[in-house]
Image (cartoon, rainbow, N blue to C red):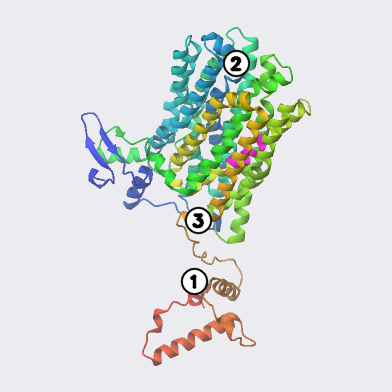
Amino acid sequence: MAAASLPISTRRSSNATVLSPDPSSSPSTVLKAEERKQGEPSAAVDLERGSEIDKDDPFTRFSPRRKSLIVATISLSAILAPLASAAFFPSIPNIAESVRTSPEVINGTVAIFTAVLGAAPLIWAPLSGFYGRRPIYLISLPVHIAGSLGVVFSNSLGALIATRVIQAIGACAALSVGAGTIGDIYSPLERGTAMGMFYLGLVLGPALAPSIAGLFQQYTRPEWRSFQALLAAAGGLVFVLIFFFVPDTSDGPTPHELAKKATGKRFVMFWFSPFRAVALLKNPNILLISLNSSFTLLATYVLLVPLTYTMAPRYGIENVALIGTLYLPSGLGSFVGSRLGGQWADFTTAKWIKKRGYRRPEDRLRSALIGGLVLFPAAVLGAGWTMETGKGGLALPCVFLFLAGVGQMFVLASANTYCVDINPARSSETIAITICMRYFAAAGASAGILPLVRAVGVGVANTIVAALSFFGVLLLLLVIHYGEGWANRSPPPPPPPTTTGLPVLVEIERESTRLEKTGVMAGVGEHPREGKSAVEIEMERKEEGSRSAAEEGGDASRSIDPLKKVVSTKLPASL
């Protein structure tokens, strides 16, 4: 393949060739298409319609057990970011004392960390589309390890902020790249369950990290620093697991491999704008889904960030280790919600495929309604006002925290999978911009929730964010009803008939029924002819039409007879 044939601009340097992407297309899509023009077979398959599975089907390249292992490993990688984000929650007063500042300032560093978690995937996602998923995992994890070790030895506010930024940049790659990996290996009907398990790590982090960090704070001499050392060790373990157990999941050669072949270079630089993913927000479907999930994550952070200052004082809890356990109900709810939410999303998708006859990505979003419209906002309200009033004791707000964890996963699991479904060629970038908006919202919640709670109380603060999350579900309803039109998608043609083993005439009769429903044979029933089936009536109509056309000198052969097509494909050659 010549360099000039690549649909991207190239410029040579002494050490490498530098590629600049065509901003209108994904490098993965463009280069794969170019390679397949050279004769490589494509792996087109429609699992929803029961077509025969092609040997090159990308969703059957790995066994179910291997796919489960891949998801489990990248889920461990994804949990690092939220673990690091929430690690400060129970120890904010102690950290402030260690670096000689105020708790409000440390809360601000949590907001900075969260904002970087949102922004950095805009860099990692395009790189994973060009170089492949696996290299990005293996490059980003050492960055996380270095940042975590830097936090351990930070003795000033400036050093703490700088090393936390490095830690966030390294930890966040799996958030978007992991979703792309799942899109690579799972079909749309399996994707919801897999995505639910993947994002379980994402939501377990804010619940587990304070519990573990509280134990380290209370019972180890390095206090909060010891948990940061544990994060570094965890990064090293995940690096080893990915190195040995996670292959690159790209379908065919990566764009980097094709570019090396085209240019004859050992390494090809890939230049791009990190803001190119922002252009995806021009798509109203992606914009509204991103807003919906952002409001959900914002409400989650409003619930969890201030527990040290709201729930703990209300019930007289001073032990940091016990304060950390207050976050566990939310984590348990997230675990339950990830299992139920992903499976419910896949079940809902399959139900609507059966009902409609084809897969419409927006149908998956219906599975979020039970969590988004009722469960999650009600739980946020209940948690806020029980903490405000103290009614129901310690148990009742814990129940509401559990229900909030369940509800948020019903919303997030379907939203994440939908983003992959509607843009598989740029799935990592689509998830990246969605994550960016979510974590910017979470950063705002981290920075502003304590002043808001002190100004209006936890009950009013939770009422505000519950209303926001409810509004987000209204945006979801807009996508469900209008998303197909906004995406300029039209219902696909009916699937071709398949051999079922039934008698040929039965299949033809079934085909005639399908044609009547689709309007191809409209008018057959206008003049019923007793004693004749729909097929016989249509055959007579075709013969009459052919005779009329012959008499008028027309060419009746130009009209396509769908029933003749069925007969020719279904009758045995011996007949």
Q: Is residue 407 magenta?
A: yes
Instruction: Determine whether 124 is above or below 26 in the image.
Output: above
Residue nearest the viewer, comparing 367 with 359: 367
Q: Main secondary structure of the magenta part?
A: helix
Horizontal side of residue 554 vs 207, given as left or right: left
Q: CA distance from mark 3 to mark 1?
A: 34 Å
Q: Which mark is residue 484?
A: 3
Furthest-right residue in view? 392
The boundaries of the magenta stretch are 404-412
Give the amino acid type for the residue marked by disc 3 in the picture: Glu
How many other residues sit within 10 Å of disc 1, few (<14), some (14-19) or many (≥20)?
Answer: some
Furthest-bottom residue in view? 551
Give me the residue at 56% from left, 9% from top.
97
Instruction: Determine whether 381 is above or below 110 in the image.
Output: below
Residue 400 visible within the image: yes
| Residue under numbered circle 2 | 91
**Residue 265 placed where, x, y %?**
26, 34
Q: CA distance from mark 1 to mark 2?
A: 72 Å
**Residue 157 placed where, x, y %?**
47, 13
Give me the residue at 47% from left, 31% from top.
118
**Residue 244 placed where, x, y %?**
49, 29
Give the amino acid type for the residue marked by disc 1 in the picture: Thr
| Residue under numbered circle 1 | 569
